[in-house]
Every structure is written in structure tokens, then in C-alpha cells.
Amino acid sequence: MSKTLFEKIIAREIPAAIVYEDESVLAFRDIHPAAPTHVLIVPKKAIPRIAETAVDEQQLLGHLMLKAAAVAAQLGLDKTGYRLVINNGKDGGETVPHLHCHILGGRHLAWPPG
Ligand code: AMP
């Protein structure tokens, strides 16, 4: 199967502004920021979307969430607040079939989302 866009970023085949990396996740700035700070954090494992995660990926998902909060703090968002978003499927607005969590902050975010 061909690599997803995010697998290519993980493999350094496509450039990205990386803000955090460890053995299992990578965080980089969104190319079309929807807020003053907009970072994506992705598992290096090619999981298409949250609906297709398995029980044995529980630890990886927990790590992804903990690191999303750590990256938000690293970027100073913990002082003012931020939002974590996972889009799943067509109505969820998913455009890249590689699990990713948006980290958004730096302005007040309206609720409900559009
Ligand atoms: P989603 O719509 O939830 O699937 O989110 C995909 C996100 O990937 C969008 O916010 C895009 O702006 C972002 N994106 C697309 N291409 C790139 C890229 N080359 N580098 C960084 N972010 C990207």
C-alpha cells in the first residue's frame, strides 16, 4: 500500500516543522493553521483513524494523549487553554487517513464547532 502523507512526513520524505518526536509519536505544525498555534500529533504506526484502533493499541493511544498535553504545554498553551480534536470519517472532516490529533490554541475557540 502507498504511504499516507503523514507516513511520508514521519519518514522525512516530505518536510514539516517538527516540534516533538519520540519513538512512537511525531508532532508537527499544520500547514494550514486554523488557530495561531495548530500542531498535529500522530502515531508513527500507520493507524488510519480512531475508529480502527485495536485493544492492543490502548497504550499507544494513551501515550498520544499524554504527549498532546505535553506538547501543548511546551508551546505555552497550558496557560491559556487549548483544544484537542480527532476528526473521524467524512462527516468528522477527516482528510488524511492516518490517525492524528489536532492541538489548537492561541485564540478563543468557539463551541460548538462548525
Ligand atoms: P484532518 O482534516 O483532520 O484529516 O486534518 C488533516 C490536516 O493535515 C489538515 O488540518 C491539513 O491542513 C493538514 N495538512 C495537510 N498537509 C499537510 C502537510 N504537508 N504538513 C502539515 N499539515 C498538513
Image (spheres, rainbow, N blue to C red):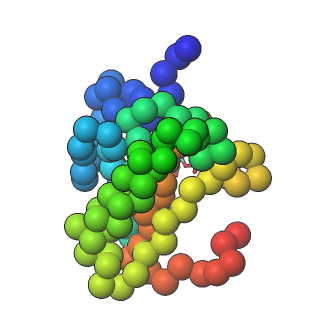
Left of 29 or right of it: where is 21?
Answer: left
Which residue is at the far top?
A: 1
What residue lies at 48% left-to-right and 54% top-to-bottom?
Answer: 101
Give coordinates of residue 63: x percent, y percent: 37, 53
Is residue 75 visible in the rendered image? The answer is no
Which residue is at the far right?
A: 91
What residue lies at 32% left-to-right and 76% top-to-bottom?
Answer: 77
* Quadrant assignment for the C terminus: bottom right
What residue lies at 27% left-to-right and 71% top-to-bottom?
Answer: 73
Is residue 81 visible in the rendered image? The answer is yes
Q: Of residues 79 and 59, which is closer to you in this image?
A: 59
Total residue callouts = 0
Question: For residue 45, which quarter of the picture?
Answer: top left
Give coordinates of residue 3: x percent, y percent: 48, 22
Give coordinates of residue 53: x percent, y percent: 58, 41
What residue lies at 41% left-to-right and 41% top-to-bottom?
Answer: 43
* Quadrant assignment for the N terminus: top right
Which residue is at the far front?
A: 56
Give coordinates of residue 34: x percent, y percent: 50, 64
Q: Of residues 38 and 100, which is closer to you in this image?
A: 100
**Above or below 7: residue 109:** below
**Above or below 82: residue 94:** above
